[in-house]
Amino acid sequence: MLLLLLASCIKEEPKNMECDILEAWVEGDDLARHFSQATDMRISDVSSGTDMLTFTVRRLSTLPALAVHFKLTPGATVSPASGSLQDFKNGPVTYTVTSEDGQWHRTYTVDFREAKLPSNKYDFEGFELSSNGKYYIWFDGPDDNTKEYVWASGNEGFMIASPNAAATDYPTVPDENGFDGYCVRLTTRSTGSWGKTFRKPIAAGNLFLGAFNSKYALTNTLKTTEMGIPYVKEPVKVTGYYKYTPGDVFTDKNFNVVDRIDEPSIYSVLYVNHDEQGNEVMLHGDDVLSSPYIVRKAQVASLPATSQWQKFEMEFDGNTPIDATLLTNRGYSLALVFSSSKTGDTFEGAVGSTLYIDKVEISFNN
């Protein structure tokens, strides 16, 4: 009877319901020659909103069948199995991750692509809804088979604050009234009751070359923005067109009204993306303008409010010599950032401030 009583008091712990890939990598010295950098063999800190993992290789035609390894949420399983040989020359491979309790699953697409020259012209005509249908994302490429998701925004973070918002009410959305065709509309939004609780009253509309990592959305928001993508040319100048209308009431992060007119922000930096020991360097919102790894910097000094399309132009400054070999091997990354509130990263700005961006072009040193 005592044993039965003890058994009745012991309850099994509920099994994990999560089914995420946390990290993916390829290992083996014999495979390193297919990658420009050793860090290209690993994708760390996979964002919870990501379902596409892309490895960049020197040449796809010479890539052998190889095994991709995964770190999963505790108890989860993946099919095909982690470490199983797959041939990626014929296209992406779909992996299905199943939660420990067996009730939930997610599909991921793993792809290997050749390093190519990034585009230097962005018209923002390529966009679609995210996989969960909540917000818009942008891609570069002429067709579905060559989409490059080089642009990111804080939309995924805004989803946490306003999960029921319509896609068109997010901070960063497409707009059909561009300088030519579609453009991007960036609007500083209120984060409502969530913002009051976490003392993050606004979400500035932003768009940047790089990736958004929602892992830090509640703890260290400046780390959510992973700025920059590898470039193999030295940038000289960035041009484009903008319109801007500031919001009516500027507030600080403590919800206090400040006698100040909101301003937009447009800037770009080129930086060395590995340190002296070969470790990956990634710039975030807290050091994108101050990191010692920056070798070139460009910033639009003044962006007056205007209801008509106006051209902007910014040239890169910096005297640090560019290492041609490092540049060829994707050793530099370029960050290009647009924001509807210049100090939105510290949650200061005016709700309703709106920046339109279109026809962006990067000029390079020949």
Image (cartoon, rainbow, N blue to C red):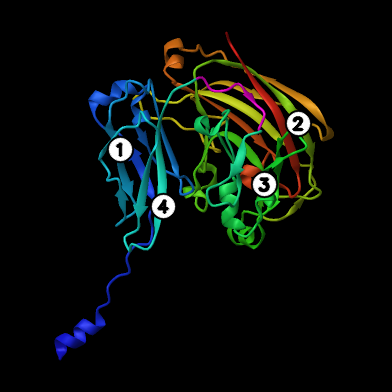
**Disc 4 packing (10 Å; few <14; some 14–19; many ≥20):** some
Q: Earlier in the sequence, mark 1 or mark 3?
A: 1
Spatial CA span between label 4 and label 3: 27 Å
Callout 1 crowding tier (Cα within 10 Å): few <14, some 14–19, many ≥20: some
CA–CA distance between discs 4 and 2?
A: 39 Å
SS class of the residue under badge 3? loop
Residue at the spot of label 3? 171
Question: Which residue position is annotated with label 4?
Answer: 106
Q: In screen coordinates, is 355 left or right of 290?
A: right
Q: Is the residue marked by circle 3 packed among few (<14), some (14-19), or many (20+) residues within 10 Å?
A: many
Q: Closer to the N terminus: mark 3 or mark 2?
A: 3
Return the residue at label 1.
68
Predominant SS of the magenta segment: loop
* Magenta-tinted stretch: 117-124
Residue 263 visible somewhere in the drawing: no
Camera-side mark, 1 or 3: 1
> Callout 2: few (<14), some (14-19), or many (20+) C-alpha neighbours within 10 Å?
many
In-image side of 212 versus 62 (left or right)? right
Which residue is at the far front? 90
Mark 2 in CB contact with mark 1 (< 8 angstroms): no
Q: Which residue is mark 2?
A: 242
Indicate the secondary structure of the residue bearing disc 1: loop
Residue 301: x %, y % from top left: 72, 26
